[in-house]
Image (cartoon, grey):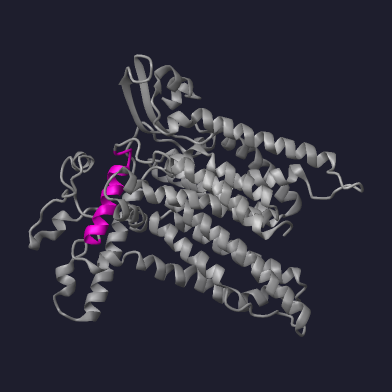
Amino acid sequence: MRGSVMWGWIGPLLVTIFGGILRFWNLPHPKAVVFDETYYMKDAFSLLTWGVERVAVKDADKAILAGRTDIWEKCAADALDKCASYVVHPPLGKWMIGVGEWLFGLNPFGWRFSAAVVGTLSILVLARVARRMTRSTLLGCFAGLLLALDGLHYVLSRTALLDVFLMFWVLAAFACLVVDRDQARERLVTWYESSPVSPYGPRLGLRPWRLAAGVCLAFAMSVKWSGIFFLAAFAVLSLLWDFGARRAVGLRHPYAGAFNKDVPQGFLSFAVVPFVAYMLTWTGWFASAYGYGRNWAQATAPGNPLFFLFDSMRSWVKYQWQVFTFHSGLESTHPYMSEPWSWPLLLRPVAFYYEGRQNVCGVKDCSEAVLGVGTPVIWFGALAALVALIAYYVSSRDWRAGAVLLAYAMGWLPWFYFAIADNRTMFLFYAIPMVPFMVLAITLCAGLIIGPAQPTARGSMPVRRTVGAAVVGAFALLALINFWWLYPILSAEVIPYTEWKARMLFEKRWI
């Protein structure tokens, strides 16, 4: 890795601070329940209070905004199931939202705090993993800056929805696997240089970064079940990297060696550890009598611990099946629903919040809006970068291009099945796990445009690198200008209606 280790941290941290200021600035605004916050902020508070999600009273949102927290339906002791809320997503994302409510109370700042923290941290994680993949601190900071300037990432980092947490755990898992890849290859090289020759190679010992990736993938599934696609893909990707490493070091039987020495620990990292971590996120449901479908009275009746365990698991499996059938049959319409093919084109953003106001912005008609939409310069640039990356991977088999393309595909392609087979209701913000990998695609292409660091005989920068750096810098500047232009409709700034309408790129689809 060229360059200073210190700057390898200072640069990404400065970009992260910039992104964090954007996300935390005026975070409680708008003082309203924005879009699906109505579900998750109450579920999070219920988890803090009861350990499970419970049913709230009618007009609970108005009571919460007025400062009241006694919002739960009252149930008799023998009818607890009447107060259990039927929720269709695992609990971890709501627990994470609940951390902010525990720290700052049941108010807009409290229920948005964790999303802002996670959104900010994802900038740092992406900058560091991009630096590791490109061996360039500058390109790492470039990647972090683009993520900080993406409109959809910005909006979800300021809204108490689950998707930003899913994105974070997927990105964290990917980063862990990239570190594990480097460490595994370092161990193989050390073995090759200092140990007797073997046709199969060594066992690589404990691989904590791959175990950490398994935990992160479990947490992704514990936010939304769509995390399972990344679990399957990243497991295959990691094992293919092991095969490639053993082949690259010149072993006579690299595949047999990988199956014997890497696959067993891979099973531990991508099957056993994720299952245990996933089940731990359901602790509140198992420990409470208030959970949906819990059947607490039946599970505790005989007084036999084994019966309690098996009956509780039976109830839990039945509940999971109900959730699965709910998702597979979800066909309700919504004015902001969209098909996955349209997501990269930003054809149907989601209006998270809109309020028309009078005489508060210097003119009669004013608008206050939060529009869930990506920054077009970044998203359309990513389309070109992904096409270029496909061609680059076909010609070079570069592992970085393959990994980014696979991760992007896992965030996008499975939704086509649900659109075709189930006609499922979907929204643009489901694409947020794709965004870090879109940025990585742009970053890898930026590295190709700039070219390798090979100074001329006189020590000056080659013309190709000068022009390439100018092109990449111009793209970053365009992204900044594009984000600045959209900022008023991403942050609920009060502006004249005509200015709001001017920012609707595809007017008929964005309104």
Magenta stretch, overall SS? helix
The percent coordinates of residue 273 (x first, y second) are 46, 71
Can residue 349 be spotted in the picture? no
Of residue 181 and residue 303, the one placed in the foreground of this image is 181
Q: In which quarter of the image is residue 336?
A: top left
The residue at the far top in this view is 364
Left or right, 92 with reference to 56: right
Magenta highlight range:
33-51
**Residue visible at 55% across and 64% down?**
235
**Residue visible at 49% across and 29% down?**
486
Q: Does the magenta stretch include residue 37?
A: yes
Quarter of the image with the C terminus is top left
| Residue 477 vertical position relative to residue 409 in the rendered view, above or below | above
The percent coordinates of residue 314 (x first, y second) are 27, 69
The percent coordinates of residue 485 (x first, y second) are 52, 27
Left or right, 236 with reference to 368: right
Of residue 93 and residue 255, the one placed in the foreground of this image is 93
Can residue 251 be spotted in the picture? yes
Q: Does the magenta stretch include residue 385?
A: no
Quarter of the image with the N terminus is bottom right
Of residue 272 and residue 116, the one placed in the foreground of this image is 116
**Numbered disc total:** 0
Q: Quadrant of residue 499?
A: top left
Left or right, 342 with reference to 290: right
The percent coordinates of residue 162 (x first, y second) are 38, 49
**Residue visible at 61% across and 40% down?**
382
